Structures are given as structure tokens and as C-alpha cells.
Image: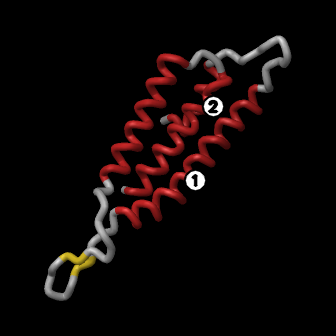
Amino acid sequence: MVIANIGTIVLSLPAEQTLFYAAAPVTSVVATQVRILSLSNTLSRLLTGPLADLLSPMPLRAQCGALIYPRQYCFSRIVFIVLACLLLVGSFTWTALRLVSQGYVWILSIGAGVAYGTIFTVL
């Protein structure tokens, strides 16, 4: 839902204006958030896939039917999903409680991008 509606989320918040600069154009702010979300999603997919394969390899089945782990088994892949879900909950909580202007939507964009990328890579 965040990926599909990031533009609407940005537009629903007031623009950030200070004494030194005026607010950026709306299309620029929305495009920046889409870019941040896409990059964080892509980078988390590229990093999580090999890391999950290294730390929690999938077992191979021998001819006799026994499961053989090709490398040392460190921990379950569920750990990746739980950490990603905690990051997503943290991003949503921060957004609900602390987000007041367009200037900090990047926290939601990065949190949602990394969490979605990690969850769907591991799954």
C-alpha cells in the first residue's frame, strides 16, 4: 500500500518551508520519494538474497532421502522476515506519531522499501 500511495502520502503533508529556501515543487518531492523507495527496495533485495543463502542455506536431499546442509546452518530464514516486519512496524509507527511535513517522508520510504524487498526476497 505504501508503494502504490507514496505520492498521495507526500501530497497530504504540508511542504517544508524555512527562512533560507522555499518548498520544492510537488512533482520533485514525489519523484524523489518514489526513487528512494525503489532504490532501497532494490538494494535490500540484492543484499538480502545472498546473505540469506549464506547464513541459512536450504537443505539438499540425498538419494537415501536424508537432508544434507551444504554449509553450516546459522539461523532460520524467519529471522530475516521478523526483522523486516519490525522495521516496517517501526517505520509505520514513526510515520503515525512523528511525521508532520514532507521533509521526513524519506524515513517511511526507506523503511518500507527495505522491509518489502527483504520479505519478498526471502519468501
The residue under label 2 is which amino acid type?
A: Gly
Q: What residue would you read off at disc 1?
A: 43
Q: Residue at x 31, y 77 (%)?
A: 70
Residue 10 located left or right of residue 21:
left
Q: Position of residue 121 (x, y in %)?
A: 44, 57
Position of residue 64 relative to residue 3, above or below, is below
Q: What residue would you read off at disc 2?
A: 7
Position of residue 62 relative to residue 55, above or below, is below
Q: Residue at x 29, y 57 (%)?
A: 75
For mark 1, does the 10 Å Cα neighbourhood hold few (<14), some (14 to 19), or many (20 or more) residues? some
Q: Position of residue 19 (x, y in %)?
A: 83, 11
- Secondary element type, mark 1: helix
Closer to the chain start, of discs 1 and 2, is: 2
Do the residues under discs 1 and 2 have CB atoms within 8 angstroms?
no
Residue 28 marker: none
Please name the colour scheme applied to the rendered image.
secondary structure
- Secondary element type, mark 2: helix
The residue under label 1 is which amino acid type?
A: Leu
Image quadrant in which you'd find residue 36: top right
Q: Residue furthest right?
A: 20
Image quadrant in which you'd find residue 24: top right
Q: Position of residue 60 (x, y in %)?
A: 27, 77
- Measure how far apart labels 1 and 2 are at the Cα level: 21 Å
Q: Residue furthest bottom?
A: 63
